[in-house]
């Protein structure tokens, strides 16, 4: 008798000590090598207010600090540099390199280079992971992030900082194309949602920790140095990271696959079954971008997933960026908007297991849509605390439910695509999501044209993606797919089962299940 990997995990433990250790190991990765490099720019590239230098000066005669949204914000661009100064109790790349006026675009260049690196890293990393294995690609990303972060700590020229951000993003792309897949593939299907989505708790911990560190460490170089120090122990992860068992089987390396499963059994104190492992009956071993469009079902799943990822990333970062301009303390605002993600992860785990991946994603998108529409209906009057509280509540609600969708789509896409395409599917979808991340800052900028535009656009995007999500299959409780043939056969089986179920339950009524 031959056993599938899911069958073996049920016998040797699919949610026990080994999986918990794996969760905490990659949780450390999520904090120090994923969240910190991504979100630290909120503080190290922050732009403070400015004020006129005291004295007899006819060029600068403002008596109050000028904020980013002030009508007089650009007035300093026509003044001598010595006539004005920053008003801040912190330093940043803006204050050190004077990234204002004609140089202000460099702030965007630095962040654009990061997201460009992430996109390239995800696409290339996904292909390399399917061809050479998850472990080597993951570790390459870790090394790249650590080195790039150290390089950014001591640059004398801003160009060096930009180059560091580019390679930081590239390493992040390599890493994100693999480590979530590894966790998913070592967890039994009954517990996959709980364990995989639990990784998002570490992202939230990182956000709160980053707000605290930024509050305590006001110098941008020392804050970045702290991040580099915390991430350096990640260089030891090569000796603890397992290779994907399913990938090994696709390469015909059953002995190595059994070795990895033996480690799981040993740590979980279970007996490894002696049965043979089911070898995929296919010559498909290396997934590439074209495989995602090999047939109509795969093409439909690919394009819809890309669209959902763009929307979710756009709304998540759009709300995050927009919340900074609520008029509260910078560090407190960042922490409070991060706290809302805690119940979101819990609700995502509960909902994905109770109602399925599909319903959870769709509901998250629809509620975010409603919250965004309500937010734009609240008057823009900062003198009214009720209006401020209302906008904050709606922004928090949108972020809460978009986080539920964000968590669920990670799990959903892993289960929709077969093993040899899984990393490629996840990496390309995540890369498309980076388009949403990149676009978010520009969508928020549209508030300068009309206050209804940012949240209006985000609301419509959510509605459109929710409608498209109805066209994807539910994957709750299903075995992971191994080949393209499995995609066709399992969807046909699901459709047949649904038809029979509907006829038995109510032969007079046709019910569309989602």
Image (cartoon, rainbow, N blue to C red):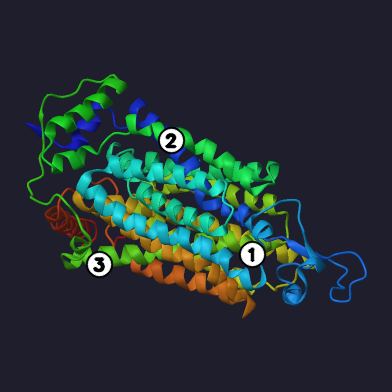
Q: Is residue 17 above or below residue 377?
A: above
Q: Are marks 2 and 1 in contact (CB under 8 Å)?
A: no
Q: Which mark is residue 206?
A: none
> How far, Cα to Cα, is label 3 from label 2?
38 Å
> How far, Cα to Cα, is label 3 from label 1?
44 Å
Q: Say which quarter of the image contains residue 406.
A: bottom left
Q: Nearer the viewer, mark 3 or mark 2?
A: 2
Tag 2's secondary structure? helix
For marks 2 and 1, the one nearer the N-term is: 1
The quarter of the picture where the C terminus appears is bottom left
**Residue 328, percent from left and from top:** 73, 57
Q: Are marks 3 and 1 in contact (CB under 8 Å)?
A: no
The quarter of the picture where the N terminus appears is top left
Q: Nearer the viewer, residue 113 or 308?
A: 113
Tag 1's secondary structure? loop
Going 43% across and 33% down the picture, which residue do you hit?
24
């Amino acid at each position: 008798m031959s056993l599938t990997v899911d069958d073996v995990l049920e016998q040797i433990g699919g949610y026990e000590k080994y999986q918990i250790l794996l969760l905490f190991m990659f949780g450390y990765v999520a904090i120090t090598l994923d969240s910190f490099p991504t979100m630290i720019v909120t503080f190290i590239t922050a732009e403070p207010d400015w004020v006129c230098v005291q004295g007899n000066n006819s060029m600068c005669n403002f008596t109050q600090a000028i904020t980013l949204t002030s009508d007089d914000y650009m007035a300093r661009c026509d003044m001598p540099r010595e006539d004005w100064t920053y008003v801040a109790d912190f330093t940043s790349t803006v204050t050190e390199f004077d990234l204002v006026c004609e140089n202000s675009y460099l702030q965007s260049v630095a962040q654009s280079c990061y997201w460009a690196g992430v996109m390239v890293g995800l696409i290339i990393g996904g292909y390399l992971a399917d061809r050479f294995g998850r472990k080597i690609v993951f570790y390459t990303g870790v090394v790249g992030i650590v080195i790039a972060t150290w390089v950014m700590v001591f640059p004398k020229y801003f160009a060096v900082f930009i180059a560091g951000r580019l390679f930081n993003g590239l390493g992040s792309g390599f890493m994100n194309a693999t480590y979530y897949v590894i966790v998913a593939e070592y967890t039994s299907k009954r517990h996959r949602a709980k364990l995989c989505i639990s990784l998002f708790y570490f992202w939230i911990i990182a956000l709160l920790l980053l707000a605290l560190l930024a509050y305590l460490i006001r110098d941008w170089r020392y804050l970045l140095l702290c991040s580099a120090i915390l991430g350096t122990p990640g260089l030891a992860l090569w000796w603890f990271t397992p290779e994907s068992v399913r990938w090994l089987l696709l390469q015909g390396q059953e002995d190595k696959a059994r070795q990895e499963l033996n480690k799981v059994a040993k740590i979980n104190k279970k007996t490894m079954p002696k049965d043979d492992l089911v070898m995929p009956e296919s010559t498909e071993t290396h997934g590439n971008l074209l495989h995602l469009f090999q047939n109509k079902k795969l093409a439909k799943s690919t394009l819809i997933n890309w669209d959902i990822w763009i929307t979710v990333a756009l709304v998540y970062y759009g709300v995050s960026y927009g919340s900074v301009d609520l008029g509260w303390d910078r560090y407190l605002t960042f922490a409070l908007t991060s706290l809302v993600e805690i119940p979101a992860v819990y609700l995502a785990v509960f909902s994905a297991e109770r109602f399925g991946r599909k319903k959870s994603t769709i509901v998250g998108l629809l509620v975010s849509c409603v919250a965004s529409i309500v937010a734009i209906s609240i008057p823009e009057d900062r003198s009214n605390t009720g209006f401020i509280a209302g906008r904050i509540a709606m922004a928090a609600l949108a972020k809460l439910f978009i986080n539920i969708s964000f968590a669920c789509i990670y799990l959903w896409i892993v289960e929709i695509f077969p093993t040899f395409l899984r990393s490629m599917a996840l990496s390309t979808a995540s890369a498309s999501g980076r388009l949403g991340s990149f676009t978010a800052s520009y969508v928020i900028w549209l508030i300068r044209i009309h206050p209804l535009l940012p949240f209006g656009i985000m609301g419509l995007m959510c509605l459109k993606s929710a409608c498209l999500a109805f066209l994807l299959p539910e994957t709750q409780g299903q075995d992971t797919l191994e080949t393209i043939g499995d995609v066709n056969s399992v969807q046909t089986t699901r459709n047949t089962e649904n038809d029979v179920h509907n006829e038995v339950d109510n032969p007079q009524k046709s019910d569309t299940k989602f």
